[in-house]
Structure formats: structure tokens, C-alpha cells
Amino acid sequence: MMKEFPKDFLWGGAVAANQFEGAWNIDGKGISQDDVVPYVDLKKATDIPLFDSRAMIEKGLTDTAEIYPKRFGIDFYHTYQEDIKLFRELGMNSFRTSIAWTRIFPTGEEETPNEAGLAFYDALFDECLKNGLEPIVTLSHYEMPLNLILHHGGWSNRKTIDAFVKFSETVLRRYQDKVKYWIIFNQINSGLTDAYLSLGLIKDEHPNIEQSKFQSLHHQLVANAKVVKLGKEINPSMQMGSMNYDMTAYPATPKPEDVLGTIENDDAQLYLSDVMIFGEYSKTMQRYFAEHDLALEITDEDREVLQKNTIDFLAISYYLTTVRSSEMPNILDQIAWNMNETSRNPYLETSEWGWQIDPVGLRIALRKLNLRYRNFPILIAENGIGYRDQLENGKIQDDYRIDYLRNHLNQLREAINDGVQVIGYQPWSPIDIISAGTSEMEKRYGFIYVDQDNHGVGSKKTDQKRQALIGIKK
Ligand code: BG6
């Protein structure tokens, strides 16, 4: 099947620093918002806690009772050489990961970068290149210095743009000869419903949280454009992209209002990529801001920078589709993600975590993006299935995952034959890592099993990882 894809297609796998590096307090790394998120046993708790208050966040700084899985990840920081060899064995020619801002500028306010952090990524990218893996690097993947959240209002503060641009410039310059593909923001549109992880907002401290949310997203858009500009100045051959999650909507019924609701859902989810690709806010969004009394601070300089520095490719994650009815609130009006508001599509299977499996939806999503963005290059930066894999005799019989991938790849190939310009496929994730949403280890996506449970217990050893290499037919 791989032969039927374009030459130079980026076949890889995607992960993020905060979910797999571990070494949270090693070699000068600062604390990020992920390091204070505890593991919650979802069999006992009713819901994933939201980090809406300062007290909840500060608890994580001194607490010794709970487990904080994103602090230890799968300890990739210390095992990257062995793990990268396994990635090569998987047949990957590329590898998507992120740089932890807090390894480079631990509080976001230092004058000079932390050399030990920079040296780690030098060694990592060298190792990737040595093993034939083209690095695809995310600059912001749910990770920023906690100091900027606790003392400066996260992304609601315009000064965060400067701090992020400084961090980005440091790493763009440092790795300009090693990294060609950059994804500036992971799933920038998840800021619509995830104030803490995406935007660094402590919700209870924002009397008008809607205003703060859209202002923060505007700051991210300006930062995005400034980093595109820098990338092109530093090395014109760099490919500067940014990312959305894609959750294409189907109407719950043929009722015209439900169909309109799906269009509104798409417009809402894509408003940030519209700005990053067209260089300006759509009329639909301008109307939304006006009708909701949202007076964003958008300067003339902002408009100019957005206009002149559009991205080279759009990265998307694709896991599931959704169903919309006219009774459901527009995603722009929400500030927290609520899976239960999505009605189930009776034609699709659902994972244990409520994510509906929809390979054809990938083709639909790509066709829609192609219409909207006129043959714009797209990178599938994430796609995969979380599953409670069972290890038996050192192996996992993961036919469900093989089927999932095969079915999605078949639809992806169809979309490419339909004319969509897809430059690569980076499934989430080549190796088991901590879940972003639930902090579980046992929501596994990996092709490589890691011997570690939700409590961080397990050998984590590479030979164990190797023994359990799964899902690969050579
Ligand atoms: C994407 C994120 O939304 O989904 C990843 O970019 C995340 O960070 C992935 O891990 C899967 O979600 P989860 O919650 O199952 O880890």
C-alpha cells in the first residue's frame, strides 16, 4: 500500500515532550502546567478535574500524595537512543515530537537559554537524522512555563507573545540545519475548550472568560505569524506549519437548522486556520465578535503581521467525527469540552473512551479542507486509537489497531487520489505514552508496548519495549 502514496511522503509517528520525556526536574528544566496535573482514577472519579482555580494548581507544587504521570512520562529523556532505533525498525522515515519550552527557558523570563536543554535536543535530532528520521517539531504542545500562568496570566497577556517568540527564535536558530518541518502550535483550536492546557488561563481569575479566551487565541495567532516570519528569515527552506484538531460534523437530521449547525461547527473549528492561511479574520468571526460584545485588542501591527506571514502547511489531528443538532451550543460559546454533548452516530463504533471510529470521515474531512483551502498542503499530524492493550506472553494481539490504521490509510489514499495534497502521516503514537486528556498510561496508542501502568509502576525497560514490539508485519 505504501507504494501507492506520493514519493517523499512523511511516514512517521507523533508524540509530545510533556507526555513522554519525563525528567521533569532534570538538567535545569522548569515546571510546566502539565507537571501539576495528577492522575485521576476514572473508575472512581466522576469526571476529569478542570484546573480552574489557583489552589488546584498550587496543590500540585507541594503535594506528595498523588501521582503526576506527565512528570515521568516513559522516561524517553534517558532512553531516546534505544527508542529511536525501534522507530527505525518500524519503518518510519520521520518523527514528530515537541520541544519543551521549560527545558529552554525554565520560567519563560530568563535572559539566556538553558544550555543543557538545548544540548538534549541537539543530541535527539542528531540521533533522529542518524537513523533516517526527518524530525517534525512542534513548538507549543500543551506546555508552557507554569510561572507565566501563575504570575502573568498565561496567553491572555500580550507579553507572552514576546516570551514565546524568544523561545522559538532560540530553537529555530539552533536547529536550523537539523529541522526543516515546524508545527508552531499543536491543535491551536483546542484553546476554544481547554483554557488551562492550551491557553494557560486560570479560569476563576477571569471575570469575562470568553473575552480572555478569544484575546489569548488572538495572541497565539500573532505569535504564530511572528514565528513564521522568523523561520523564513533564519532559513528560507524551513516549512512553517501550524495545527488544528479536526472534528468534522454530521447533521443529526436533514432538518435545515441541523445542517446549518454543522456548517457553523466547521467555521468555528477552522476560524484560527482561516486566519493562519488567509491572513485575516473571516466575516463570520467578525460578526460573532460583534454580536457577543467581544472587543478584542487587535492592533494595526497585528493585522499586518497576520496578513504577511501565513503558514506553509496545515497539520491536523484526526481521531473522530461528531454529530450536531440545532439544540447543541456552538463550540465558540463553550469553555470546556463535554463529550456527552455530542450525540452518538449510530453508524459508527465507539471506543471505550467514547471516541467514534470513522475512517471515511477522514476522507470527508480532507475533501472539505481541500475545498476551503484550495489544494493547500496538509500533514496528518495525529491519528490513532486508544485501547486497553493486554500483554500476553510478551505480545499483544492488536488486530483492532491494525484494522484501524489500514482502514484510515485506505481512506487517506482515496483522498489523495481525489486530489488532496497530503504530505505525510504521523500516527499517534509509535510508542505508548501518557494520555493528554486523562493522564492514564493504560489508554495506549503505541505500536511499541511500554511496561508501565497508570501508577508509573513497571520496568519501563527498553528490552521489555523491544520484546513487545507489536503490530508490525515485516
Ligand atoms: C490530541 C493531542 O488531541 O490527542 C495529544 O494533541 C493527545 O496530545 C491525543 O495525546 C490523544 O488524546 P489522549 O487524551 O487520548 O491522549
Image (tube, rainbow, N blue to C red):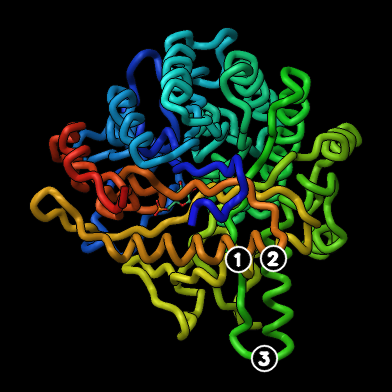
**Disc 3 residue type (three-letter):** Pro
In this rendering, the label closer to the viewer, 3 or 1: 1
Give the left or right position of residue 314, taking residue 79 as reference.
Answer: right
Q: What secondary structure is found at the residue carrying circle 3?
A: loop
Q: Nearer the viewer, residue 349 or 10?
A: 10
* Disc 1 to disc 2: CB gap under 8 Å: yes
**Residue 48 appears anywhere in the view:** yes
Q: Earlier in the sequence, mark 3 or mark 2?
A: 3
Return the x and y of residue 259 as percentages of the image width and height: 70, 82
Q: Earlier in the sequence, mark 3 or mark 1?
A: 3
Q: Residues within 10 Å of mark 2 (few under 14, many from 20)?
A: few
Q: What secondary structure is found at the residue carrying circle 2?
A: loop
Give the left or right position of residue 370, taking residue 354 as reference.
Answer: right
Where residue 254 is drawn, which disc sits there?
3
Name the residue tied to disc 1. 414
Is 35 rendered above or below residue 441?
above
